Amino acid sequence: MFLYNFKYELKSLLRSKWLFLLSTILLIVMLFAGYNGKQKVNKRIEDFSKITAQTEERDAVMLHVLDSLEKGLEVNMSNNLLPNNPMNVGYRYPKVAALQPKPLTFISVGQSDLFTHTVQPKIYGDNFSYNYSELSSPVQLLFGSFDIAFVIIYILPLIIIAFSYNILSKEKEYGSIKLLASQPISIYSWLLQKVTFRFFWLTLITSVVLLITFIINGFDFGDNMGAFLSLIMITTAYILFWFAIVLAINIFIGNSAKNAVSLLGIWVFVILIIPATVSQLANLAYPIPSRTKMLAEVRNVKKEIAEKQDKILDNYLRDHPEYASTGKEINYSFWHRYIASQNLAEAELKPLLASYTEQIENQQSWIENWQYISPAVIVQQSFNNLAGTSSAHYQEYKKQVVAFSVKWKDFFTPLLYKSQPFRKKMYKNLPMFEYQQPKIASMTFNAFIILFFSALILTFSWLFFNKKSEKGTLIN
Amino acid sequence: MIKTTNLTKKYGDFIALKNLNLEIKQGEIFCLLGANGAGKSTTINLLLNFIAPTSGQAFINDTDVVKNAKKTKSFLTYIPENLMLYPTLSAVENLDYFLGIGGGKFYKPELEAFLEEAGLQKEAHHKRIQFFSKGMRQKVGIALAIAKDAKVLLLDEPTSGLDPKSSNEFGELLKKMRKNNVAILMATHDIFRAKEIGTHIGIMKQGELKHSFATDQISLQDLEKLYLETMNLNEV
Amino acid sequence: MIFQIIKKEVQEILRDGRFKISFFIVLFLLVASVFITSKQYSSINEQYDSAEKNERTVWESQGAKNPHSAAHFGNYVFKPKLPLSLLDQGVDKYTGISIFLEAHNRNQAQYSTATDQTALSRFGELTPDFILFFIIPLIIILVGYNSFTKEIEGRTFYIIKSQGVDGWKLVIGKWIAALIPTLIITTLLFLIAGIILSNIKGFGVFSWSSFGILYLIYLIYYFIFTNVILLISSISKKSGIALVSSLTFWVLACFIAPKIASNIADSKYPYPTQQEFSENIAKEKSEGLDGHNPWNQKSKELEEKVLKEHNVNSVNDLPFNYSAYRMQKSEEYQAEIYAKHYKKLKNQFKKQSSIYKTLAVISPFLPARFLSMSIANTDYQSHINFSDAAEDYRIKTQAFLNGNTEKNSKIGERYVASADTWKDLPRFEYTPASLSEKLNENTSNFVILFLWFSVTGGLLFLTNKNY
């Protein structure tokens, strides 16, 4: 039966032009999505190299000036900007803390359109005030991006539904099911095979289309084969999930129009309503602390500490440390007080800010656990993780930037306390930022969960089937 | 070949079939007559195990249709009232598919020979089914029975909607099948055709087999009279 | 005759189990979303109120200090949540909620809700606009996809035709019938929203005419959908094909077109990155007047000019505090730089808007969405208006503070303003654009929407010749 089903399913698919139509649509859509993703990644890389080049150029000038200073030569730079002052290096020659794209970043925009990917922590100012949000039109954020993740999560299920919503009901409405059922075969395994072939073909087409898209986008398969295979694995599991649903609905309902409507209802539920509900419930379980309230509290703290800070350092210089040094000599005692007043502010704000971060992290980890309620959410999270554009990646980035900023400050403060100038040889010891990828849920585990959903649905469909054949409502 | 003992099907309080005892031997054509809802299709559906009996048993080739559903299906061929085949496939391909999924393997010349034996003209063998008339599709169904070497043929209203010529052709085909020692059960409204090709006739009403006799025991006029009388009891 | 048609269609719809289930699910979702949104709305507004009060108290109780220090202490302004956001949240989630106003720098609005949420929220949220824009069209599809095809499949079409019915009457009847469930749901939603809004006192400005226009926009959107779905049904041969085509239209109009538009807009008219943007501004600022640096080239030019104007030799002889004067000039200069760069952003968005309008050809969703956000004052333009108002206020605040120093102190003096100075700074006021302004901004969107309506309507009547 297997071979015959395979052969004739393929024949009738080819004759109805379905395979051709499907492959073409999928290829066009995927290529467009891949192109969009790649463009965004290219822009990110371009922005990064631009800013790195700028930094390097600036640093070269600084090293040259330092060299001259150390040799006792005249330099063409105003006194208050000289790089032998550690504070000037810490403020005017910051390093770039960048979040570099991963090889798979182009598959999913994820949260990357919300956040900036280059921050330059400086020695002045508090960590609280870094702006991590990217400049973009909110309309774009609202509509989202047409990326590969969108094609797979939203469009692929619709193709499956349009392609197979009537896989059994058609036979029933047309009448051929009677002839089939009078053959010495089990209708369930016949149907299962039919669905399996379609699943097989769609997976094959999708994989080939993805492969083409990846090749066109210059993906390095040698180094990133694992990531590519993970993507294919998750996608395959997701396709299987939708075919399982299609099978179950065909058995459960058995009228083409009703099938289509029910499948669409399921699509809306799995992809739109469940994520929205989980999101809403997360707000109930761990309400995101109001930023408005936080700002009010920060203001109260800042006002209180201002008085304490005044005792350490005059408020004018606190606001404008860049004007502290006017002469050639470095005013070390000023900087001691500046850093003391900064530390005071930081220390006072820390518990308040920490409580907000904690609440947000609580909510995010809650959602992390609830993602398993809908395969669409699992797939989205998996893709974002593969692409390095998940919320966790950016949360981690913020944390690491703050840590780097502390490291940056800590590099210069000892120099100030020891009243030492910044020297050329110290340059290579300056802290550098390197992003450490956060731990992400295993792709195999995620795929396994989706498979579990499919298995559950298939079991139910088997039970329905038996019940229906007992009643005899499957054929008549 | 076909045998039922006290076969009964109830849907709640409604009795679709009541204690049917039927035996059709090889080479017999049994025509079931009766109004809509008399239980003709229920009988066929029970024999096909499309529905499960409430009580009683049915056998095909001495095999219980419920306990060994798959095995019994390998003995029979079923042609529903409106035999639908896959429209984009040709006659040969449809035949190949239905035989194939049941485990049979035939070469193209063999398949063509079956179709020919079933009376489908050669030009149509490789045409798509979507262009076929009902009569032509039924010939494909008969070819299926020939290929399977079916011992039992179950026919549900095969002649309804056929033009007289096709209907006649179909009758001749059944007679031929009968000579091949096939047991045929045919549900029909067509008294004339039943009398002409059937070896036995049964008249059903409200799930019960009211009369059953060999065709040669009765003239067409008497048959019609008996049929109408049986039906009219309804109104009493 | 039309009444008979409507009656029969409605009976058919009502007897359809699918419809009943979907209708109640949608109704439930709608009630849940209105409930959730209105709770959020009132809690956000309470927080807004108390934050604003707190901010003013903090500002007024700074104590005696130098005005420029007060300028650095700065103040936060908060964006109010407007009443109609209850119906359409628009881009609210993606725009910052508050702006820090300080000397020398124009800051962007910070802390958008989206940046605090996980990627999950990008799937969509259970808000009334989500249901109004995405789910209700599905109801129209569900009710209307087989409007004509069922007559052909059930062969009833021949009987209808043999009764001599006018084609257009049949179309009108089916059109009205297909809209009835949608009208009921939408009207119910607006009724609930109206009751909630008229019971919230003291928050924002709520205008019934905006509310009415919003209702109208959704109705037109649904009329267009009904036109398209019936059109598809009347030219399709089978219900299945009609259903699949209708759903394709829905996905294309509501999901794919906006995303494609957003991608094209982004690649054709990109925004600078945050880093580039601030780098460019910093560069221009460093080339200009620096309020703190008297040795800067531009500072020297200003000094010469002022001395000449007042006919004195030294800044010490000027009748006002020259350093505060210079500070104010520098603020004004920098504000201009900011205005220039923000204007570039706005222009970029204007160009992007033209892409959205072009793609409205394949999607009536786009103009409807823009109109609805705009009337609800939750569109990008409203956010721009708010941030411009905040910038105006920042400039005024700086002028107020620098003016205070300029008037009351001498150059070189360590001036401390009295503790009650800060009360004299007027409060920040932000009035959202009025309905007529919004309508003027959106004439093209109205035109596009109307074109959609008339073209699809016209086609529907033309194709009914077959009936």
Image: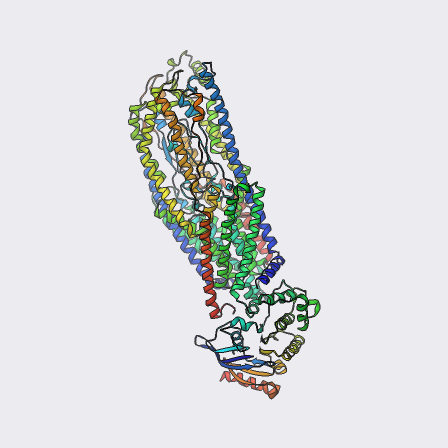
In the depicted view, which residue is nearer to us: C54 or A350?
Answer: A350
- The quarter of the picture where residue C229 lies is bottom right
Q: Position of residue C299 (x, y in %)?
A: 44, 18
Q: Is residue C146 at least partly visible in the picture?
A: no
Q: Position of residue A431 (x, y in %)?
A: 42, 29
The answer to whether A359 is drawn above or below residue A419 in the figure is below
In the depicted view, which residue is nearer to us: C29 or B98?
Answer: B98
Q: Position of residue C325 (x, y in %)?
A: 40, 20
| Residue with the most extreme top position | C313
Q: Is residue C107 at least partly visible in the picture?
A: yes
The answer to whether C146 is drawn above or below residue C327 in the figure is below
In the depicted view, which residue is nearer to us: A342 or A297?
Answer: A342
Q: Position of residue B69 (x, y in %)?
A: 52, 72
Q: How many marks?
A: 0
| Residue with the most extreme right position | B123
- The quarter of the picture where residue C230 lies is bottom right
Q: Quadrant of the N terminus of chain A?
A: bottom right
The answer to whether C278 is drawn above or below residue A293 in the figure is above
Residue drawn 44% across and 61% down?
C20
